[in-house]
Amino acid sequence: MLGAVVMLMVAIAVEVGATALLPKAAGFTDPLWSALVVAGYGVSIWMLAIVVRSMPVSVAYAIWAGVGTAAVAVIGFAFLGETMNWFKAASLGMIVLGVVGLNLVGTH
């Protein structure tokens, strides 16, 4: 199970990296950046598919989507010039709480 968790974290990191590169892909008009984005998403989904062999898909996907969403929002704020206000921060906090809740329920 530890291997699945590590692989899930790597899958999330790859997906977040690919998502952070989306502005460089310029609406998929830049071939190099577009290829990197698509390859990143492909690798991430492939790794997620491996993870769900040993972890419930509902838990794995909730973690993948929730952590990925929160990480992209933080990266957008820190590096891509996006805004962060109290409502956005609170919403991200609720996503994290939801992922933790699903994780707790998924272990029983």
Image (cartoon, rainbow, N blue to C red):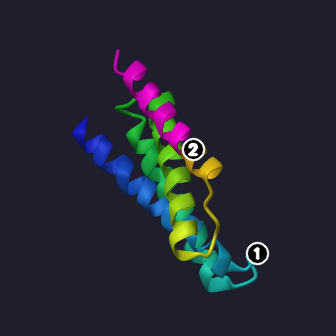
Residue 23 position, x and y percent, is 66, 76
Question: Tag count in the figure?
Answer: 2
56 to 73, vertically: above or below: above
103 to 37, vertically: above or below: above
- The structure residue drawn at horizontal position 49% and vertical position 57%, both measured from the top left corner, is 71
The boundaries of the magenta stretch are 93-108
**Left or right of residue 81: residue 103:** left
Asked if the residue at tag 1 contacts the one at tag 2, i.e. Cβ–Cβ closer than 8 Å, the answer is no
Residue 77 position, x and y percent, is 56, 67
- The structure residue drawn at horizontal position 36% and vertical position 51%, both measured from the top left corner, is 9
Q: Nearer the viewer, mark 2 or mark 1?
A: 2
**Residue furthest left as drawn:** 2
Residue 96 position, x and y percent, is 48, 40
Between 56 and 74, the one lying in front of the other is 74
- The C terminus - image quarter: top left
Q: To which residue does mark 1 refer?
A: 27
Between 51 and 106, the one lying in front of the other is 106
The disc at residue 66 is none
Type of residue at label 1?
Answer: Gly
- The N terminus - image quarter: top left
> How far is mark 2 from mark 1, CA to CA?
30 Å
Type of residue at label 2?
Answer: Ala
Q: To which residue does mark 2 refer?
A: 90
| Image quadrant in which you'd find residue 100 | top left
**Residue furthest front as drawn:** 86
**Left or right of residue 35: residue 60:** left
Within 10 Å of disc 2 (Cα), the crowding (few <14, some 14-19, many 20+) is: few
| Residue 54 on the magenta span | no
- The structure residue drawn at horizontal position 54% and vertical position 39%, both measured from the top left corner, is 95
- The structure residue drawn at horizontal position 46% and vertical position 40%, both measured from the top left corner, is 63
* Dominant secondary structure, magenta: helix
